[in-house]
DNA sequence: AAAGAGACGTTATTATATAACTCTTTGCTT
DNA sequence: AAGCAAAGAGTTATATAATAACGTCTCTTT
């Protein structure tokens, strides 16, 4: 029932990255939007790990690798595009961004974020949480547009390590 | 089953304010912490409506009424105190603060926020959402520490008005 | 009175995000 | 192919949110 993005101790993370990029290409092609080199590079950087990444972290990397100093709008435009197309999620509690593990279908991101290792685990939609929120909203006549569910705590791996 | 903070079209809002302040006095007395004039004033301002209020909005009011120009730390210290003592909640999606309608018991805030009237409706704890989150967390061995649930959409009143 | 703690003032700075304008690239139309 | 419109991206400046660091005042406790 429960499924998370595949985050494990020793997984071959380059596979996550290449899968994500490939998936992004597909999604963009299908929608007729352009995954430009900059956008692709930003996505790649967001996917460097399963830890949410700040806009200014991305900016720093871009600046270093480009020589010339990239400015905030460069990164934010990339992030905005990726957000609009569901290729990444924004975590409001951290002001940070993370790759979406199933961008084919529009959905809200539900996250469990480990305070220790900083990994963020995305829960799939149609979870119990989704049902519970819809139900409560319906009871009060509230029409849901966007949702923000971010749970902070300690993940299983970190807990066992301690 | 469902309960929200009492936000209705024509409610006597000064009652919300005075109740909140009284409740805050109680809570602080009980815990042996000081609800200083500044802290009380910040709480009062947060309670001016059921719409989340930004720190700099509060700052502006304080500045105007004090003559001297209040500085950010003044407000943030007040807000921090109120947050620590569960008298207000912070809404990460809006970078804003809102009065807590039942500060006697420590709890996470679950909110439905209307994009039109800007009112934020706090759901009580032990709702279905709480259960769903705990359940999902348990399944993945995740130890929950803090939760953030903010649902944006249109409230019943605004929907009917339209 | 001296010492220590808590609350708050004050100045400066950090972190996050956007506005407004420019120029270039891209793809489309003729 | 030339011209055009729109999208993309560079650049500078600024807005918005939050914190750091230090000083002062006022209590309380001794």
Image (cartoon, coloured by chain):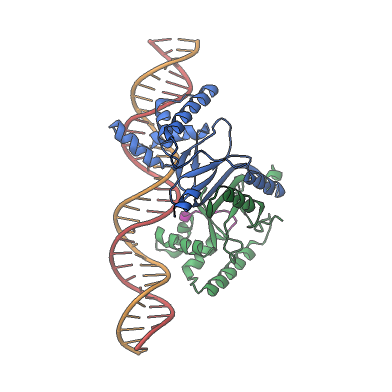
Chain colours: A green, B blue, C red, D orange
- Asked if residue A98 lies left or right of residue A127, the reply is left
In percent of the image, x 70 and y 50: which residue is there? B140
Q: Is residue A146 above or below residue B45?
A: below
Residue A28 drawn in magenta:
no
Q: How many marks?
A: 0
The magenta segment: A49-56
Which residue does the image show at 66% across and 47% down from the upper left? Answer: B132
* Residue closer to the observer: A1 or B116: B116
Q: Is residue D27 above or below residue D6?
A: above
Q: Main secondary structure of the magenta part?
A: loop
Residue at x 31%, y 35% (from the top left corner): B63
B46 and A79: which is toward the camera: B46
> Where residue A14 appears, x then y in whole percent?
62, 64
- Visible in this render: residue B69? no
Q: In which image quadrant can residue B2 be found?
A: top right
Q: Examine the image and state in which quarter residue A161 appears.
A: top right
Whether residue B118 can be seen here = yes
Of residue B111 and residue B77, the one placed in the foreground of this image is B111
Image quadrant for the C terminus of chain B? bottom left
Decide: is A19 above or below A141: below
Q: Nearer the viewer, residue B86 or B161?
A: B161
Where residue D23 sits, quadrant-wise, is top left
Q: Is residue B110 left or right of residue A64?
A: right
- The image shows residue B44 at horizontal and vertical percentages of 41, 32
Q: Residue B159 in the image: state x and y as whole percent.
A: 48, 53
The question of residue A52 being in magenta is answered with yes
């Amino acid at each position: 029932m429960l499924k998370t993005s595949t985050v494990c101790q020793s997984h071959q993370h380059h596979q996550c990255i290449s899968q994500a990029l490939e998936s992004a290409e597909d999604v963009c092609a299908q929608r007729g939007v352009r995954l430009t080199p900059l956008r692709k590079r930003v996505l790649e950087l967001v996917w460097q790990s399963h830890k949410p990444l700040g806009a200014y972290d991305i900016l720093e990397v871009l600046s270093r690798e480009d020589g010339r100093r990239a400015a905030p709008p460069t990164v934010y435009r990339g992030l905005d595009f990726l957000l609009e197309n569901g290729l990444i999620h924004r975590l409001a509690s951290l002001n940070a961004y993370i790759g979406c593990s199933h961008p084919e279908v529009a959905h809200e991101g539900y996250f469990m974020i480990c305070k220790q290792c900083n990994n963020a685990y995305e829960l799939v939609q149609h979870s119990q949480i989704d049902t519970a929120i819809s139900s409560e909203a319906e009871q009060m006549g509230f029409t849901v547009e966007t949702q923000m569910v971010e749970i902070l705590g300690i993940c299983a791996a970190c807990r066992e390590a301690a």
